[in-house]
Amino acid sequence: MYSDPGAGAGTTNTETDLHKTDRLPTSQSLSEPYTVSKPSQKLWISLITSFAAMFSTMSSFVYLPALVPISADLNVSLFLINLTVTSYLVVAGVAPAFMGDMADQNGRRPVYILMFSLMIAANVGMALQTSFPALLVLRMVQSAGSSGLYGAAYGVIADISRIEDRGSYVGILLLMTDVAPSLGPVIGGVLVQQAGWRWIFWFLIILTGSHFLVILFLLPETQRRVVGNGSWKAGGIYKTFLPSLRPRATAHQAEGVTPKRVCHLPNPFTCLPILLDKASLLTILITAVNYAVKMTLQTSLGTLGVETYSLSYLQSGLTYLPSGIGGGIGSFITGKLLDLNYEKTKARLKAEKGEQVDKLSLDFPLESARLRGVYTLSIIGSLGAVGYGLVLMTQTARHFTG
C-alpha cells in the first residue's frame, strides 16, 4: 500500500484534537451531532478530497517514464534529472508541515486554493521551460503544492466522521492515492511516446484545473475551528459557490453565531512534539522506511525498464500497473477491515465484561483494534521488496522482454 510523504505532517494537530474530541465528549458535543452533514454529503466530500489527494502521488509518478527523454532533450545527465525526483521528495517532506498547520488554524478551503494555485502555476512553467535549473525549481514548487493534499484530505475526513466509521472514508482516500502510482506511469508513458514529455504537464494542468473548479464550487469548509460541526455560518473564502454539499442551516446559523476567526502564520514545528511519544515515533519511523523503500523501487523501475530491458516508454509505464492495482485493492480492503476490527474488538470486550462497551470510552483499546493484521501486511510488503531485488539482481525477467 502507498502512503504520502506528508501525510503525518499535515494531520498531526487535526488528528490529535479530533481524537480527544471523539474520546472525551463535552456537554456541547453530547447535545449536538458530531457533524450536521448527511451521509451522502460526507461521501461526496470524501470523494472530492480523496481525488484531490490523488494528485500528490500522480504528480510524482506520471513524471517517472519521462526521465530518459527529458535527460536527452535538456542535454543533461540522467543523474541530474534524478535530482528533480529527489528535490520533489525533499520538499514533500517539509511542505506539509506548513500546509497542515495553516489548514488546522485557518481552515481547509484557503489551503486547498493555495495548493492548487501552486500546482497549476508550476505545471504551466514546466510545460514551457527549456532549462534544467528551471525544471528543478518548478518541480519543488509543484511538490510544495501537491504534497500537502493527502494530509488535507485526511483532515477533512477527520472533520466529518467519528473514529468508529472513519475507516471506510480513509479506505476511499487510500484507494485514490494508491491507484495513482499505477495510472500515472501508464499515462506518462503514453504521453511521452505519442506526444512528447511536455504533454505530461499539460495533462496535469487540465486535470488539476478542472478539479480546482470542483473544489471552488462544491467543497464546503469543514475545519471545526471555523464551522464547528458544520452548523456555524461560513462566509467569504470559506463559502462555496454552490450549496449542494453545504449542510443546512441550523439554529446556530439562524441566530448568527459565528466564531471570531484570527489568521495565524504557519508554524511547521507544531507537529514535532508527537515525536516525543515513543509509540508515535515508532509508527512514523516504520511508515517512513516503508515509503523510502517504495519510492526507491518505483523511481528505479522506469529507468531500468528502458535501459536494462529495452522497453518502450509505454511498456515501461505499464510495469507500474501490478503494484498500483495491488496497492489500491489492498487499501480499499484495509479500510473495510478497520471498521470490522472495531466491531470485533467491541464484541470481544462485551463478551468479557458482560455489558455494552462504548467505543469512545478511554478503556476501549483503540490501538489494538487499529493494529490488528499489521504484522501480516509488513511481512507481505517486505517479501515483495526482496523479491523485486532478487529479480533485478539475477535479471530473471529478461526472457519476458526478449
Image (cartoon, rainbow, N blue to C red):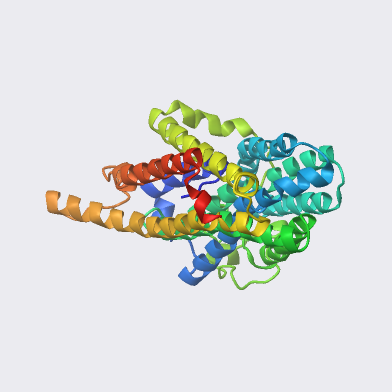
Residue 347 location in percent, x, y? 20, 56
Residue 270 location in percent, x, y? 57, 33
**Rendered image quadrant of residue 221:** bottom right
Of residues 86 and 309, the one nearer the viewer is 309
**Looking at the image, residue 263 lies above or below residue 109:** above
Residue drawn at 60 percent across, 51 percent down: 57
Question: Along the horizontal axis of the image, is 65 left or right of 387?
Answer: right
Q: Quadrant of the C terminus?
A: bottom right
The image shows a total of numbered marks equal to: 0
Residue with the most extreme top position: 276
Question: Along the horizontal axis of the image, is 198 left or right of 21?
Answer: right
Is residue 61 in view? yes
Of residues 313 and 321, the one nearer the viewer is 313
Of residues 10 and 257, the one nearer the viewer is 10
Residue with the most extreme bottom position: 244
Of residues 59 and 300, the one nearer the viewer is 300
Question: Along the horizontal axis of the image, is 295 left or right of 35?
Answer: right
Residue drawn at 54 percent across, 30 percent down: 272
Is residue 161 in view? no
Question: Along the horizontal axis of the image, is 60 left or right of 19?
Answer: right
Residue 187 location in percent, x, y? 65, 61
Residue 235 location in percent, x, y? 69, 60
Residue drawn at 42 percent across, 36 percent down: 283
**Looking at the image, residue 95 lies above or below residue 337:** above
Residue drawn at 51 percent across, 46 percent down: 3
**Looking at the image, residue 44 lies above or below residue 28:** below
